Amino acid sequence: MFPETTFEYTISPSPTVMALANTTFLQNTTEECPSIDDFRNKVYSTAYSIITVFGLVGNGFALLVLLRTFRQRSAFHIYMLNLAVSDLLCVSVLPLRVVYYVNKGQWNHGDFLCRISSYTLYVNLYCSIFFMMAMSFTRFLAIVFPVQNLRLATERKARGVCICIWVFICAVSSPFLMAGQTVDEKTNKTKCFEPPSGQGVGKLMALNYFSLVVGFIIPFLVIILCYAGIIRALLGRANASQQKQRTTRIKAIRMIAIVTVTFLVSFMPYHIQRTVHLHFMTRKGTSTCDEVTMQKSVVVTLCLAASNSCFDPLLYFFSGENFRNRLSTFRRPSGVLHTGPRKASPSEALKALEDNDNQACNGPANVA
């Protein structure tokens, strides 16, 4: 230990002096570096409660609108529907975490719910990322390759993509089912959601890098590349002398900025800090203050990641006329819904980019 090395070649003080010095040192350490438990319990219970309320209300209302206007379904509509379901499932397990942290880290709901609540949170966290990536790629096809989009971005193919996303994420997240409840020998409390120690850290490190690359970096690069292509196409296509096209271009770029910033705020801090924290856990000789600081940062970034469920309903509304048109249709009597078949040529699909975000993002809608 560091103190032993420091005093190895100095005059050894008396046992009484050493005892007093150690007592004073431990008291100062305790005062300066309080336990993470109080901070974690307060922040998690408060943040998860707020996220649960806003997430349930926002995504529940969005899902209701999307289901009631299902006749206007399209590829983009299918992705929005699955994203809303994913967010609802994500916030549905948060109350169990709220109760856990309100009880000061005491789990009373059994091993099965402990495993399921951890598994469900991460499954829907990464499903949200992949659905956002799919939505961005659909926008890219519709704006940059509108003719090919009529053939590629179909409702049937969108359903196939969603099924593949659910199956893939559920399969690769299965290791979270292995982490159940444990008993803390010091406090005799039943614990859940706690990081492993010893050999478990190595397995968690491998899982972290897989999810970091496949679940965050690749979707992030796809989103950035898609939006870069969209901006380039809009800037090259729009005529600066035409006010209508200039307004459409500004709206599209604003939407891209909102989606990108939301993605970065929600997911990037969590993935970076989680990786740093796992490396920190493998280090030896770290001080208590450093450990507390690191754990606090993990608490904050995990709350940011979970809060994405509250941001997605805002994205539905501000991403363009798509969801707002559905909302206005939702408020009309059911008899006025347009139910006749509708076809659009490639030129009409391009024109729709200026008038309706639904057409701009998805190509022609499939109307039942």
Image (spheres, rainbow, N blue to C red):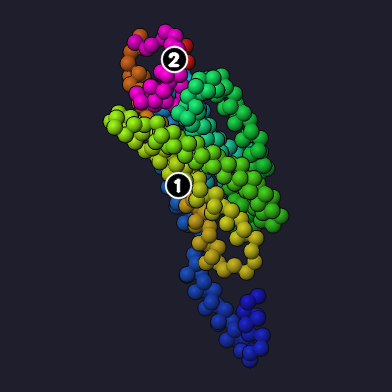
Q: Identify the disc placed on residue 265.
A: 1
- Quarter-wise, where is residue 70 in the image? top left
In magenta, the rendered stretch is: 336-364
Residue 226 screen position, x and y as percent = 50, 36
In the rendered view, tell whether residue 296 sits above or below residue 256.
Answer: below
Q: Earlier in the sequence, mark 2 or mark 1?
A: 1
Whether the magenta-drawn stretch holds residue 268 is answered as no
Q: Which residue: 59% across, 23% down?
A: 160
Name the residue tied to disc 2. Answer: 344
Mark 2: which secondary structure?
loop
Residue 239 screen position, x and y as percent = 34, 31
Q: Which residue: 43% across, 31% down?
A: 59
Q: Residue furthest right?
A: 199
Whether the magenta-drawn stretch holds residue 337 is answered as yes
- Could you give the CA–CA distance between mark 2 and mark 1, rounded to whole angstroms? 38 Å
Mark 1: which secondary structure?
helix
Q: Which residue: 50% across, 67% down?
A: 33
Residue 243 screen position, x and y as percent = 28, 31
Q: Residue furthest bottom?
A: 11
